[in-house]
Image (cartoon, rainbow, N blue to C red):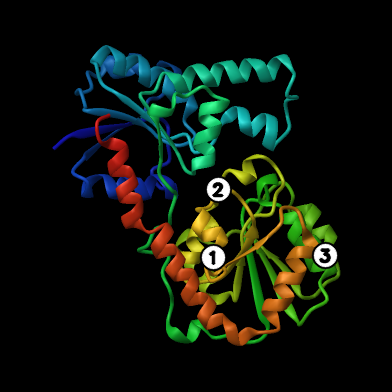
Amino acid sequence: MPSVLWWGRFDPDYSRNRILRKLLPDLGWSIVDFHPRFSALGDVEARLKRLAKPDLVWVPCFRQRDLGAASRWAKRQGVPVLFDPLISAYDKQVFEREKLALDSAAARRLLAWERKLLQSADRVIADTPVHADFFADTLGVSRERLSVVYVGAEESLFSPGPVEQTSHVAPFEVLFYGSFIPLQGAEVIAEAARLYGGPPVHWRFIGNGPSRKRCESLVRGMDNVTFEDWVAYQDLPEQIRHADVVLGIFGTTQKAGRVIPNKVYQALACGRPVITRRSPAYPKEMTEDMESGVIWVEAGASADLCAKLADLARHPESLPELSGRARSSYQHFASSDLIAQQLAATLTGI
């Protein structure tokens, strides 16, 4: 059985990691973990510990800081390196958070650093085809080294509930959960709640993050809008199944147009209709299918969100059918079987 060494100061319980680490043994790979004390000196520590030579070194999501040392050690061992960044540090600082001006020296240094890092990997995984385009066009990763593996959802947790949970019970409940970062566009939702004039709706926000205070100020005094802190991860599926519709992301940043967020996969897996921004990140068949269980709105458009939600709230009898379509879309476009196929193709010939 080939072995894969997961290298870095990563969180094994992060959903992306949990999903892939569950699939790898199913594909015939054994997993060994290495958590260096210091990312930059991980190769030195690995030599001192005389780590056994694996068949593949895997650097998981967000661990750009571990990739350099992992690549150095792997090169000495004659072992290929796979990197699953999920996000780009350059994209995050320049286009998402706008902390660095595009034409600044700091941005150019960050870009050069990340380009060099990603080009040291033998295989780079992107979570969507348009993210793969960014890695190729901006970060210089050669196309033949790129693969796409969707994020998906943990199906042991996120699954449809009992039949009665697909039937509407007043009041109509709209759920947003997230970390209130620019990509998610939570302010767009809060503005929609403020402008909304359709049938009665309860807007429920779960989570914390940079824009939460701004959202709270936009809807201050509205008794049909509530904010809650994070719930335990294992309790999240029940919160999704309790909602009539789940809200995805509505941000206008470049990154928002390149990703399919966890919440969309999780809601569809639970058989819940989703309203989210239109994006080229989704399979074309899904965005063109009027019966996908996903309702598309334009990025940043609060009025569009209001109109689509009001139409849905006027016809709660349509929810059971929409829920079935949502689950079908998940099974067709994002199931664990599909992700296993993508992962298997990625590992073939590496």
> Local crowd at mark 3 within 10 Å, few (<14), some, or many (≥20)?
some
How far apart marks 2 and 1 lie (CA) works out to 15 Å
Q: Nearer the viewer, mark 2 or mark 3?
A: 2
Please give the label number shown on residue 289: 1
How far apart marks 2 and 3 lie (CA) works out to 31 Å
Q: Secondary structure at mark 2?
A: loop
Q: Is residue 280 above or below residue 263?
A: above
Q: Position of residue 49 (x, y in %)?
A: 25, 19
Amino acid tagged 2:
Ala
Among numbered discs 2 and 1, the one appearing first in the sequence? 2
Q: Position of residue 292 (x, y in %)?
A: 52, 68
Q: Is residue 67 above or below residue 177?
A: above
How far apart marks 3 and 1 lie (CA) works out to 34 Å
- The residue singled out by tag 3 in the image is 219
Among numbered discs 3 and 1, the one appearing first in the sequence? 3
- The residue singled out by tag 2 in the image is 281
> Local crowd at mark 2 within 10 Å, few (<14), some, or many (≥20)?
some
Amino acid tagged 1:
Asp
Occupied quadrant, residue 69 = top left
Q: Nearer the viewer, mark 2 or mark 1?
A: 1
Amino acid tagged 3:
Val
Q: Secondary structure at mark 3?
A: loop
Taking the spot 71% from the left edge, 84% from the top edge, the residue there is: 314
